[in-house]
Amino acid sequence: MQLMGASMALAGVAGAGCKRYDREEIVPLSRRPEDQVPGQTQRYATCFDFGGMTQALLVTSYEGRPIKIDGNPEHPFAGGGVVDGTARHAGSSVFAQGSILHVYDPDRSQSVLKDGKGSTFEDFRAVATTLRGNPTGLRVLAEASSSPTLAALKQRVLSTFPGAAWHEWEPVSFDNERAGLRLAFGKPMRAMAHLDRAAIIVALDCDIFTEHPASAAYARDFARSRRPDGGSLGPGKMNRLYAIESAYTHTGVVADHRLPVRSEHVLPVLQAIDSALSGRAAAGAEVVGEAKVAAFLKAVVGDLSANRGSAVLVVGRRQPAAVHALVAKINETLGGSLVSYYDDPEPSRLDHGDAIAALTRDLTANQVQTLVILGGNPIFDAPVDLDFAAALAKAKTSIHLSEYANETSAKCSWHVPKAHYLEAWGDARTWDGTWTLAQPLILPLYGGISSIELLALLLGEAKTAEALVREQVEAAGYAWRASVHDGFVAGSAPKAVPVAIGSLPPAPLTATQTAGSRGGNGAYEVTFSPSSQVWDGRFANNSWLQETPDFLTKVTWDNVALIGKDTADELGIHSQDIVRITVDGRKLEVAALVMPGQARGSIALFLGGGRTKAGVVGNKGGEWKGGGWNVYALRASTSLDIAANARVEKTGGTYAIATTQDHWDIRQGMDFPFGAGDSPVTGIGDRGIAERMDRIVKETDLAAFAGGAYLAQHPEPFYHDDKHGRGYSLFEEKTYEGRKWAMAIDLGSCMGCNACMVACQSENNVPVVGKREVARNREMHWIRIDRYFKGDVADPEVVSQPVACQHCENAPCEQVCPVGATIHSSEGLNEMVYNRCVGTRYCLNNCPYRVRRFNFLDWHKDLKDARNKVRRLLFNADVTVRERGVMEKCTYCVQRIQAAKIAAKNERNRDVIPDGTIVTACQAACPTEAIVFGDLSDPDSRVSRLHGDRRQYELLSDLNDKPRTRFLARVKNPHPDLVSKSGSHGGH
């Protein structure tokens, strides 16, 4: 196996003196360099650029192989910055966390293919040489990228090959925002909102906390202005968030108020806000005239007017250019101080839909001799009306560079393996423009090359990718070694530019935009969104992400159609029914899920399912394999984001959906969750949830909190207290001396993004079990994120709560284990001794938090196959790989605790581990800093302060388990006029 070792001169990142092992051939060094210790991990900075969205990363390497990904805390845009005088970690995303699994995927392309048959790189190089001798008729179709080096090579290609054209295609893009700002300011621009300074935020059909290129920064800044006891707005102050959307997003989950409306109705709603702010008559009266909408907009307009200079509107990528332009106008009217604008780095680029349409026309007209496709999968995800496959067949030569031999590779004359981003040199820019560098942590396992290397080959360029990137950095006047070390080019971000809003063209409303929400069948809308698990389909072969439950539905291994209860009742649809959706003659059959909070008349579809050449994991299989449905069958050039006038009908078939939260739900008259005709509290199971909701998830509003409300003012009676108050305990109370590890989780900051789940899986070698076993309640995640609904089924409130082992001081699991396999450490950790466990599962049955996981089968048996041995390289060597018949659970990342203790001992300071030194995997991944870990014996530690906060409470405190994990109650900031007078109830 080829493992990477960089030279000492280009030593890695994350600390002075860090570097990878030098590459060794046959004979190892007789003496290791003094600054390297075998068996210890090292960290290097790099970046992950997908879909034009760049994330700055810090990657952990063990013995020359990358094993764990985290955000780069030193990065000026993506970093955690400084809070309370202490440098914080940087969060990441589920896709960044899961991307490392692809490095060791045996399904990755391992050889050059010519017409589907094996070939060699030498043969392909000969073809590239031939192209330079016959340079006419060249077209390049590239994925979106912000790489300066790739941009420079692009210009060289266009100047070297006469008549060449460069096209860019992404199925999920932000071109609507780009076009809208062109309408507003006369040129394409990028907008950056400053949520940490916003008192009022109005989010229009957007998921800015997970879908946007700046989502990590947005989530961090929003959370910091959300802390009632001292956030970025000052003590006792919080922002107020309004969400207007068709389907629940992470933004809607954390909103103070949410208005479910069709996505196509966002424009008339926005026009009504603009009219009210400027004193004009409102448009779209039938939409905004609905009583609930009118009351909501009255509150929004009042808050915007009263908070000019500290209010901001943000809008999602799905909305048309007219909406983005109008939002820019309103933001300028409100003062404009909370939005900065930056010049678009490629102002002349065609929008993605126009670009692939233009390429298709050229192909159809036989104007393309050679087509080079850099990444992507246009055969699968191009607009269906273009029939790109037929057009591609007309190219004389087609070359596809891709990590996988996918659907597009099968239609091309040449397929070339692409190197993973952790195997290649590269660069990119984050959303604020900071130049961020990518360095390889391992040599390409399968001999792949990067997009930079392929273009260099076409140009006859002898320089390596490293030399080309370095040339760009040094030509701009920056220091190369320092930039590689830090992972970014310091001071490279451009400054914001002043803007002046112009007069906007009229945006007339269509019939469906003025018809209200009660249009019948044939007048529904369909919205297209990236999947929270596989994005646009590129992560389909990633088993971690496939098994990560959707943040709202908790569905795994499939994509489904979300339908609101009112619409489902109209159509007689129940969850797990297969429905047929028809738009302009195009048809799609997909499984339905009846979902609380979905806007009436709106059907939400999610991209990326239904792959046929993704790999063993991602290929669509039978009902119990999963794989989802190909939503691109409905997506045309004129309806990339929203399709109107859709018709929905039942086919008579059903399809099993595997979820992680509703196992064996006890509901009256139904056999699966969210069935039509059943509100969230009519079932027996739901009533049980409702009865104990206030014990599980505690919350209050800002007014009550500011008035001195103590969230634990109504503690549950301890069962061990007798009526005389003597407080006898069923447990033998223990006193812990020395270190006391503990955790605090702020429910006011958690968005349910699942980054912590995937990070934990990566750090702790947590196995994947598959769809059938998930349906049997056998998933193995050490941390889960419970989702609760509260209120009306048509418009409920959603609460997310991360739950892992609580590390109880009076642990119920320890009382019943017959072999002492689960015990307590001297520092208060609830530990598992795997080789003692005999699999009685008594501990699982006695755990009231349902956080223990049992290995019913040997989930790693496939690793014995020769093709899967490469997957072993991903394992964290500091964590035991468990076997069949063994119980497992969260350990508070005890391996990181031990590493910190050893490091402190080696520094002859064994009694002092500074607060913040130990960061658990889930904590490091959280973009909102909702999770804090530390030592309770240190009164100055953050976790000690949070355990003493008046918002803190114990989960199921009446059991007297004394959990070491405490939750901070959620505090909301509702508008007084929108607060329900009837209270709320709960469901799940």
Image: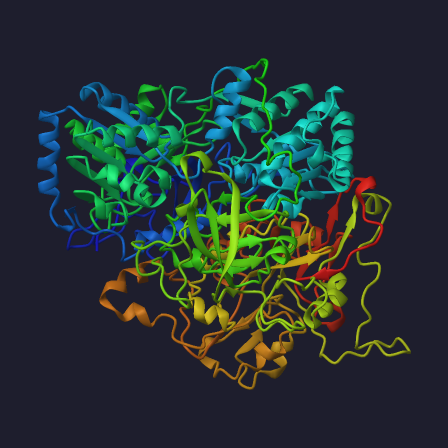
Q: Which is nearer the eye, 801 or 577?
A: 577
Residue at x-position 69% and y-position 38%: 242
Pick the quarter of the image with the C terminus: bottom right
- Report the front residue among 950 and 823: 950
Residue found 17% across the figure and 50% down from its top: 111
Q: Quadrant of residue 542?
A: bottom left
- Horizontal relation, residue 953 to residue 387: left or right: right
Count of all numbered marks drawn on residues in the image: 0
Q: Position of residue 281 (x, y in %)?
A: 74, 23
Colour scheme of this structure image? rainbow
Q: For residue 603, say whether it is visible.
A: yes
Residue at point 25% right, 30% down? Answer: 140
Residue 536 visible in the displayed image: no
User: Horizontal and vertical percent for residue 680?
Assistant: 69, 62
Q: x and y percent of residue 682 in the render? A: 72, 67
Name the residue at 34% across, 52% down: 102
Q: Position of residue 545 (x, y in %)?
A: 44, 55
Whether residue 89 is situated above or below residue 192 in the rendered picture: below
- Splitting the image into 4 quarters, where does residue 500 fall? top right
- Vertical placement of 335 versus 421: above or below? above
* Quarter of the image that includes the N terminus: bottom left
Q: Nearer the viewer, residue 100 or 442?
A: 100
- Asked if residue 670 lies left or right of residue 275, the reply is left
- Residue furthest to the right in view is 724
